[in-house]
Amino acid sequence: MKKSYTLIDLDCANCAAKMEKNIRKIDGVNDVTVSFLAQKLILDADDARFDDILKAAADAIRRVDADCRVKM
């Protein structure tokens, strides 16, 4: 399943790259894009576990930038 989410308060392109790298490590993620310019998260992950993977991705985002959050 592939879904797109708005990111709130994503501050820099370097943070976006770190977020993307960390989210790729989550089991069940097929592909991910974190766009600083568009302020978007595009997540392609296992359908059966998508909600859990999305929560793990949101945690990974907060670890890189505590102010950034995913608008669900």
Image (cartoon, grey):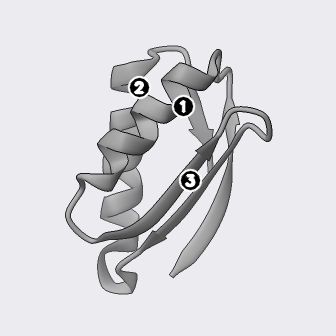
Relative vertical location of residue 37 with respect to residue 11 in this rendering, above or below: below
Relative vertical location of residue 34 with respect to residue 26 in this rendering, above or below: above
Mark drawn on residue 16: 1
Report if the CB atoms under discs 1 and 2 are less than 8 Å apart.
no
Distance of mark 2 from mark 3, alpha carbons?
A: 16 Å
Mark drawn on residue 51: none
Amino acid bearing label 1: Ala
Q: Which residue is mark 3?
A: 33
For mark 1, does the 10 Å Cα neighbourhood hold few (<14), some (14 to 19), or many (20 or more) residues?
A: many
Q: Earlier in the sequence, mark 2 or mark 3?
A: 3
- Residue 72: % across, % down: 62, 51
Which image quadrant for residue 16? top right
Side of 16 relative to 72 (left or right): left
Residue at 33% from the left image edge and 61% from the top image edge? 53
Q: Earlier in the sequence, mark 3 or mark 1?
A: 1
Amino acid bearing label 2: Arg
Q: Which residue is mark 2?
A: 62
- Residue 69: % across, % down: 56, 31
Residue at 66% from the left image edge and 53% from the top image edge? 5
Amino acid bearing label 3: Thr
Circle 3 SS class = strand
- Residue 35: % across, % down: 67, 42
For mark 3, does the 10 Å Cα neighbourhood hold few (<14), some (14 to 19), or many (20 or more) residues?
A: some
